[in-house]
Image (cartoon, rainbow, N blue to C red):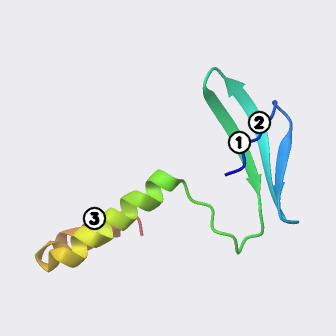
Amino acid sequence: MLILGRRKGESILIGDDIEIIIVDIQGDYIRMGIQAPREVSIVRKEIKEQIREENIKAAEKPEGLPALLEEMKKFL
């Protein structure tokens, strides 16, 4: 793991086409901006983990599938 210190307005490059910019710092809360090609998926880790857990639950209990599909319709 690489650990870097950055100040507001500074950035980090990942490869040649991904830039993470420190937009604001308030206490222990940091706001970041990410510039990346459209084909690069950017997802918060906790959301990805939640989706993975829900997928596991759905696969284990097929009887819950209709309710899950109804819930997903809200986002379409």
Query: How far is disc 1 from disc 3 in space, using C-alphas?
Result: 31 Å
Q: In this view, does 21 lie above or below 5?
A: below
Q: Position of residue 34 (x, y in %)?
A: 74, 52
Mark closest to the chain's N terminus, 1 or 3: 1
Q: Local crowd at mark 2 within 10 Å, few (<14), some, or many (≥20)?
A: some
Q: Which residue is drawn at 23% across and 68% down?
A: 57
- Apparent side of residue 74 relative to residue 33 in the rendered image (left or right): left
Q: Which amino acid does label 1 sit on?
A: Met
Residue kind at label 3, given as amino acid type: Glu
Please report whichever mark, 1 or 2, sits nearer to the chain's N-terminal start: 2
Rendered residue at 84%/44% (across/down): 11
Q: Report which residue position mark 3 lands on.
A: 71
Residue reaching furthest left?
Answer: 63
Which residue in the structure is indicated by mark 1?
A: 32
* Residue at numbered disc 2: 23
Apparent side of residue 64 relative to residue 19 in the rendered image (left or right): left
Along the line of sight, the residue nearer the viewer: 18 or 70: 18
Q: Residue 29: horizontal and vertical position, in percent?
A: 61, 29
Q: In which quarter of the image is residue 53?
A: bottom left
Residue drawn at x 77%, y 69% as measured from the top left? 37
Q: Position of residue 72 (x, y in %)?
A: 33, 68
Q: Is residue 56 above or below residue 12?
A: below
Seen at 71% across and 42% down, the residue is 32
